Amino acid sequence: MNKAFVKESSDESDDDLDAAQPAIPAGAKNYITPAGYRRLRDELLHLIDVARPEVVKLVSWAASNGDRSENGDYIYGKRRLREIDRRIRFLTKRLDLAEVVDSSKQENVDQVFFGASVDYAGEDGDVRTVTIVGVDEVDLDHGRVSWISPIARALVKARIGDQVILHTPAGPEPIDIVDVRYPAPESDA
């Protein structure tokens, strides 16, 4: 039978899924912390060494059972295999473009750069903390913001005691830099 008649439909195209991933500005490097790089690399290795072989084994077993048109294990296994392959391609591209920045070696520790944890106070006086990380490491629940986010762009190059302007949808908001910290160097143990 011709492949055109048995091709499974996909709810999402590759382009739609790639567009949903965090974007890196054109011409910019993919800055990432050493810990973030390790997490992406570990995920890639897990997909290649563990997850993909398991799904290939399942699909192979399901295919040996005969009629593939009504075989749920086969259909969903093939779909999962496409998802894994798509994620492997994405991670490979991101890791190839990654520029690892070890902020623990920062010399100007009173100034905000990539990898800094910054305490800042808004007009209301509440002190908030954010850590400036790569686009693939963002976790707003833990205060980890991308280096291309508006808050990070406002904070970068500021020093303790400076007041900077954060451009928000509600208008410009002055914020005061209270403290800047960098992670301790990791031991090679």
Image (cartoon, helix red, strand yellow):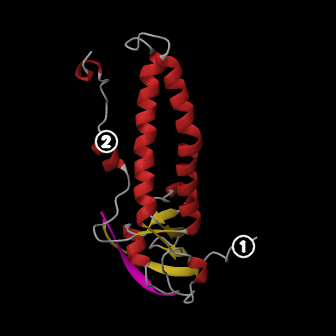
Q: What is the quadrant of the N terminus in the image?
A: top left
Quarter residue 68 falls in: top left
Q: Residue at x 38, y 74 (%)?
A: 153
Residue 117 drawn above or below residue 8: below
Q: Tell me the tag on residue 14.
A: 2
Do tag 1 and tag 2 residues touch (Cβ < 8 Å)?
no
Q: Tell me the tag on residue 1.
A: none
**Residue to which mark 1 is pinned:** 188
Q: Residue furthest right?
A: 189
Q: Residue at x 56, y 38 (%)?
A: 51
Residue 27 visible: yes
Question: Residue 28 at what x, y percent from top left?
Answer: 33, 71
Disc 1 to disc 2, how far (Cα)? 39 Å
Amino acid at pointer 2? Asp
Secondary element under disc 2, as helix, strand or loop, is helix
Residue 135 visible: no
Q: What is the quadrant of the C terminus in the image?
A: bottom right
Q: Which residues are the magenta region?
A: 161-170
Majority secondary structure in the magenta region = strand
Question: Residue 168 at what x, y percent from top left?
Answer: 33, 66
Amino acid at pointer 1? Asp
Seen in the image, is 52 located left or right of residue 13? Answer: right
Are there few (<14), some (14-19), or many (20+) residues within 10 Å of tag 1? few
Seen in the image, is 3 located left or right of residue 64? Answer: left
Quarter residue 50 falls in: top right
Q: Residue at x 29, y 38 (%)?
A: 13
Total labels: the figure holds: 2
**Of 141 and 126, which appears nearest the observer?**
141
**Of 166 and 96, which appears nearest the observer?**
96
Based on the picture, tell me whether residue 164 belongs to the magenta stretch. Answer: yes
Based on the picture, tell me whether residue 116 belongs to the magenta stretch. Answer: no
Q: Residue at x 54, y 25 (%)?
A: 58
